[in-house]
Image (cartoon, helix red, strand yellow):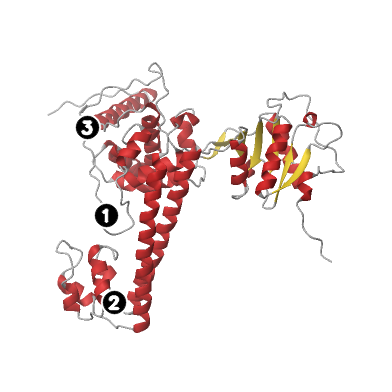
Amino acid sequence: MRKKHSTARSKKAFSTASKPLQPSAQMPVINAHAAGIDVGATSHWVCVPEDSVAGDQSPIREFGACTRDLDELVEWLLKCGVKTVAMESTSVYWIPLFQKLEAAGLEVLLVNARHVRHVPGRKSDCKDCQWLQRLHSYGLLNGSFRPTDDICRVRTLMRHRDNLTRACGVHVQHMQKALNHMNIHLHHAVSTLTGETGLRILDAILAGERDPKELVKLRDAQITRSTPEEMEAALTGDWREEELFVLRQSLENYRHLLKQMEKCEAEVEKALAKVVANPATVEESDRPQNPPPAHPDKPKRKKFRILKAGTGLKRDLRAELTRICGVDLTQVTGLNLLGVLILISEIGVDMSRWRNEKAFASWLGLSPGNKISGGKILSSRTVPVVNRVSTLLRNVAPAVGRTQTWLGVFHRRMRARLGPAAANTATARKLACILYHLLRYKEDYIDIDCLLYQEKMRKNRLTRLSKQAEELGFELIKKEAA
């Protein structure tokens, strides 16, 4: 007979034949009341200091992953006098336990599993929790970044909205495929298939209209991508019932996802109303002294345009985001309301979590690497980091490079020197430093005059050339104007 599974093991101490890890006499103990937890899908292994348990009880226990087991785990840690906990970020199984520990008032360090996987002598989950407890007691572990709970709620909704956006793109591809099978080139005659003209023509086709001349009458007068004659030729094809069925269902799914996205944005607005604004905590003496801008006038505010079609943001959340951030981030070149919303949902507004803008850019994976061995630089590539903010800043960099701003001049200069990919990374790092400064010191963004920036680059270039000429034994002489 198969043994019935029971959670009774969560109440028993784990007795192991091997002795617990002995503390080192050469390293000072930084966290005396530290615990280590190895997170799993069905059970969690917990290790507390040996002197925190009474009698012959084992400092290692295994608890289940159910809610009542997590409550017992937290109660046992509090009974043992634990004040700080280190746990591995295993998939998403750590989230319920992290929230329980955080609600109990314990300091929780979420450790990247890659940072401790090379520790020798670990062959089981029991050994994992012992190593985590030992390393954390010596202060050798660094916790991963996690925003506050109110920001995490907004982040969950924004990531769900991103999934809805991706699903909309899949159904648009299905519509394009069905049109291609019928040799209808509507998505080539208009800039976007889901625009106002494209949706009007698709509705007319699904309503039974097949005459290209009648369909062309539904086009917008502002379309310049194709002429009426070209669009009439693009709307002539082989109408097949099965492809029209696929087209109809794909369009229905697309519009259903748009409605779901509007509901998601309504929930995002409710969650933003509960976010507490973080005021500037920097003293005036610590505030950097910047030179006065060339144009001290307040920049004009970008006008928010509600998109009637597509997956863009439908709600004007500028006032709410300005309240939370303390500054209007949409004035930064390349950022719109959706970009600012993604930025805030991922990192929050508390920039004191990073010591300076360089540390913030390094956390985003936008700083050059420093891999040196034997005095030789092996690699200076940026560290591969999966970060939505980093991806956002890299994606807006090419658009920034097409603007007539100092950031655009910087992007074009880096593109000529390093290539497009490195220029995008360099511009993204500039944007990250600007955002850190604005959120940390709560100052309005003021665009520098391009002429001032170009003059500064010219002076730097002359200084560099003068030093090179002096090293080679030459002297620079200014050429007189004719």
Question: Is 377 positioned to the left or the right of 447 in the image?
Answer: right
Viewport quadrant of the N terminus: bottom right
Identify the amino acid type marked 3: Leu
Question: Is 222 positioned to the left or the right of 288 in the image?
Answer: left
Q: Which mark is residue 451?
A: 3
Q: Residues within 10 Å of mark 2 (few under 14, many from 20)?
A: some
Q: Which mark is residue 228?
A: none
The disc, 2 or 3, on the residue closer to the chain's N-terminal end is: 2
Identify the amino acid type marked 1: Leu
Q: Provide residue 73's location: percent of width, then percent of height.
A: 70, 41
Q: Provide residue 197's location: percent of width, then percent of height.
A: 22, 66
Decide: is 204 above or below 103.
below
Label 2 sits on residue: 206
Identify the amino acid type marked 2: Leu
Q: Mark 3 vs mark 1: give the one in front.
A: 1
Q: Distance between the residues labelled 2 and 3?
A: 55 Å
Tell which of 134 and 256 is nearer to you: 256
Viewport quadrant of the C terminus: top left
Counting the numbered discs, the total is 3
